Amino acid sequence: MCGIAGMCVKDVDNLSENRLRAIGELQQHRGPDNMGILLVDRCGFAHNRLSLIDLTSAGNQPMVLGEYVLVYNGELYNFLPLRDELERKGRQFIGRSDTEVLLHALIVYGVETTLKCIQGMFAFSFYDGGSQMLYLCRDRYGIKPLHYTVRDGDLVWASEIKAIGQVKPLQIDPIQALYSVAGNAEFHHETTLFLGVKSVAPGTFLQMRVDQDADPQSVRYYEMNDDFDPAYYRELDGMSMETAAQEFDRLMSDSVRRMLIADAPMGIFLSGGIDSSLLGALAIRHTRDLTLFTSNILGRLSEFPDAQAIGKFLDLPLYDSPFAPGDFLKHWTACTYHYEAPIVRHVSAMPMSQVARLAHQHQVKAVLTGEGSDELFLGYPHLLMQRYENLVRTPLRLVEKAYGIIPGLRRYIIPNESEQVDGFLNLLVQGYERQRFRNQARGHFAFMNEADFKRHYLSIQSMKEGIVSLLMRNDRMGMMSSIEARFPFLDEAVVRFGVNLPDKFKIGHSSRMHNIMHPFLIDKAIVRKTCEPILPKWLPHKKKLGFPMHAHRDLTIAPGFFRDGYAAQLLQMNESSEAYMLGTQNRYFVAKLAALEIFGRLYALGESQSAITDRIYSHIAIVPK
């Protein structure tokens, strides 16, 4: 993984090596091994390298071949067979990097065809000097970040938004910022919290002629619905659980094997749960040259003993990063700076940043991590709770029916959420992404009845929405310490398997109380089944704990924290309204507003991280319940 950036300018006088170097220096944590700068025509490119494959200078970037230029961030897991194919076509290679393979593929096959055949995680800019075409490309699921802005006729792009700010001043979008308190900012595919700054959407690329005054055009080359195949669905539906688990084991083992390819030390982020433990069991089939790292969340809900037990079972070294309740306050500001958004949904970003720091201290450069399993195989309790929806809603339906006897009375007593203006505005700010995607998906599942479609669609919806926020967390927190995260559950073949797998393999049944939130239903049944023969017997029966820690719900905020700050300016909050809010409102919601305050003081008011952290310590305390 690396840091990439560049600019295409209307006036070549605005193109300078110094400006690109400023961007590169700000992204140095993403790639400390080498920084490269290149100016060509009206374009400039910057690259910060974290060397993992071919550690020699042959893998440095920007990589130039004739009139073609590539600046690339990511890993291609099928680069070796692709290289063999290109060599049969007469292409010659200097080094052993996947970057060089990607460059040759783009030249031979073109951008769109290459994007459809490469497998991995990536964000890159590719320039064809002959046609004067510039491309900005992002992987299918949005694993690698890529942001851009078009201003004053100039296009500027980078792995991190703050790097764009070195060339074009950043201004927070007040509407998006306000709604980020609801966690929206962490789930957007294209929108950011900064005016005029967008993200290249997952599964798309931008293209533009650099010799013409025109904005880049977006082209979609992949949509998750494309993976759905009725024939594959029926094939899987005809399997037994044992056969489906064997197929899943095969796909995951192959994914892990390919993601272990590196010329630098690798590790695994081990939580003590089933997903990361499965990765460990599959990884040792291929190598024992691995180190395990875990976050030791101090307290009664710690999973550290389970992580220790798994480490001992796998016979791999395990290192832990202790995280006390007060450490949340200690790392809040620095993590927000790298997060480039208020940390509202994934407070686990803080301990994750420290696990990445620990891995860096042990000279590890890349880790396997378990994101994607919960989304593909229904691992979240709220997804399984939908099975009990009819039972839970029966009393409410009776009340609604009673009030419905009198025309017009029902909507006053039990208002419809869809009729509320706050719900409307929330959907509007999100661009109706969920609704538009769901409507598109329905046509792909035409052979299913509505009930089957709703259950099957849960995995796709979770992948489409939730995974983006988790990938954002892992990228930002890992790259704080130059750690690349790799995601075996997001291998293209595994995703296709999960998207087509009938939900009878994802939701199991039990006569015992498995989880109080879904008493007789078992989440991620096929993942648990796959774990049974290769991991300790107790693990497949472990219920999901998430990432329990003391955070927003445990904060107490003293008057004065918001004084003269970003939220006070945004909401015209005076001392009396702040005091009333702190004394009467839900402290969990107030803590989320504090997350916005920290973000605003960093990116709108320009305060230093140390000053903000001092303010946190003087006004906020964690009082565990």
Image (cartoon, rainbow, N blue to C red):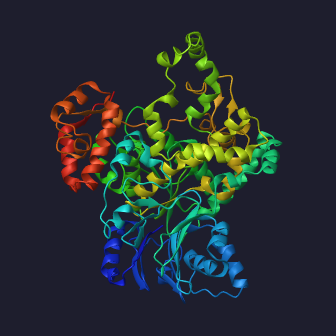
Comparing 188 with 455, the one in front is: 188
- In the rendered image, residue 372, in percent from the top left (x then y), is placed at 58, 49
Residue 615: name its quadrant: top left
Left or right relative to 376: residue 164:
left
Q: 77 or 294, which is in the foreground?
A: 77
- Whether residue 543 is visible here, answered yes or no, is no
- The foreground one among 31 and 108 is 108
Identity of the residue furthest to the front in this view: 407
Residue 32 showing in the rendered view: yes
Q: How many marks?
A: 0
The residue lying furthest to the bottom in this view is: 66
Q: Is residue 6 left or right of residue 112?
A: left
Q: Which quadrant of the figure contains the C terminus?
A: top left
Q: Position of residue 575 (x, y in %)?
A: 16, 34
Report the residue at 56% width, 33% height from top. 381
Residue 328 occupies quadrant: top left
Asked if 398 appears above or below 441 in the picture, the reply is above
Q: Residue at x 36, y 81 (%)?
A: 11
